[in-house]
Amino acid sequence: MSAHPRLSLNQATIKYAPLAEALDVAREAGYTSFGAWREPVAEVGLDRAVELVKASGLRVSSLCRAGFFTAQPGAARQTAIDDNRRAIDETAALAAAGAPGSAPVLVLVAGGLPAGDHDVVGARARAAEAIAELAPAARAAGITLAIEPMHPIFAADRGVVSTLGQALDIAESVAPEVAVVVDTYHVWWDPDLAAQIARAGASGRIASYQVCDWMTPLSADSLLSRGYMGDGHIDFGAVTRLVADAGYDGDIEVEIFRQEIWDAPYAEVAARVAAAFDETVAPFLS
């Protein structure tokens, strides 16, 4: 069994699998790449995670996720900055442990509005300031900081950076080490998507392409309204062509948050992800 050579299984898709088991599932399903998450890494400790990744023979396509730094100046903001510095070190270690072609990419989610704060523009500016503060550490570690814009439905509680254009504004204002994530779940609706993907490609700032579908009706927790590609509303051919034409040739992560998928057998999920990718994304990569 073999999966498409550019397909990466993001661990969030099999959320309940411990890191060792998740790596085994990906390898046994024929994947050559894996998208890691910080929480499973923390459960085993970074040193053990590095050993597991090295033994797996898989590439690491990214580490999810850091960020969440929209707090006003003070202790909470400093705690977030310190945590992001640790995440940079974790990304470097895992990328070095992965197979050749691993991507030293740390995915950043800006964070939402602090309690009692109604100034989304100010919160976005503070996120940009935090990223600028972290850029020298990323440069020293050889890490790309990849800003993931989130669908506007999450602006209050998770991500005040809502469009690819906003993410690129921050990246271009900071440093070459700052790039963006194109995640179909978050950007498929954007009427300016084609121009912004082309803009990201022109400056070499597409650090990751993540795919999953947008499902309706929305779940009670809208973050879980994702599905296998082809089961929902997103035109993967159109978005994938844009990303390919922009010059992105790295791994493509499937990242699905959905309770019934999390509850399904991991090997079954990995197989279905690969089949859906072959049908909806792979034909548009060349």
Image (cartoon, grey):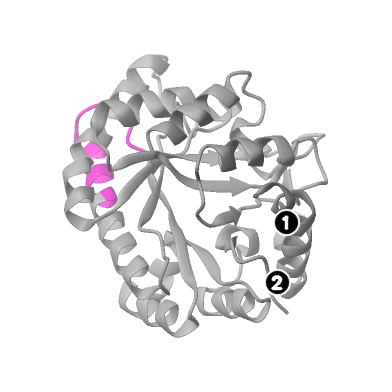
Of the residues under marks 2 and 1, which one precedes in the sequence? 2
Image x and y of residue 252, in percent: 57, 54
Q: Residue at x 51, y 25 (%)?
A: 196
The answer to the question of whether label 2 and label 1 lie on touching residues, with beta carbons closer than 8 A, is: no
Quadrant in which the N terminus appears:
bottom right
Q: Which residue is mark 2?
A: 266
Q: Residue at x 50, y 54 (%)?
A: 250
Which label is found at residue 140? none
Q: Which residue is mark 1?
A: 277
Crowd class of label 2 (few under 14; some 14 to 19; many from 20; radius 10 Å): many
Residue nearest the viewer, comparing 99 with 56: 99
Residue nearest the viewer, comparing 285 with 66: 285
Q: Is residue 224 magenta?
A: no
Q: Amino acid at mark 1?
A: Phe
Q: Is residue 82 magenta?
A: yes
Q: Secondary structure at mark 2?
A: helix
Image x and y of residue 243, in percent: 57, 39
Image x and y of residue 33, in percent: 54, 67
Query: Which quadrant of the view contains residue 21?
Result: bottom right
Q: Residue at x 35, y 75 (%)?
A: 97
Query: Which quadrant of the view contains residue 264?
Result: bottom right
Q: Residue at x 58, y 58 (%)?
A: 12
Q: Is residue 153 visible?
A: yes
Q: Amino acid at mark 2?
A: Tyr
Please give left or right for residue 142 compared with residue 9 in the image. left
Q: Which residues are magenta?
A: 68-84
Question: Alpha carbon of mark 2 to alpha carbon of mark 1: how far?
Answer: 16 Å
Image x and y of residue 162, in percent: 51, 26
Please give left or right for residue 84 compared with residue 211 in the image. left
Q: Secondary structure at mark 1?
A: helix
Please give left or right for residue 239 compared with residue 161 in the image. right
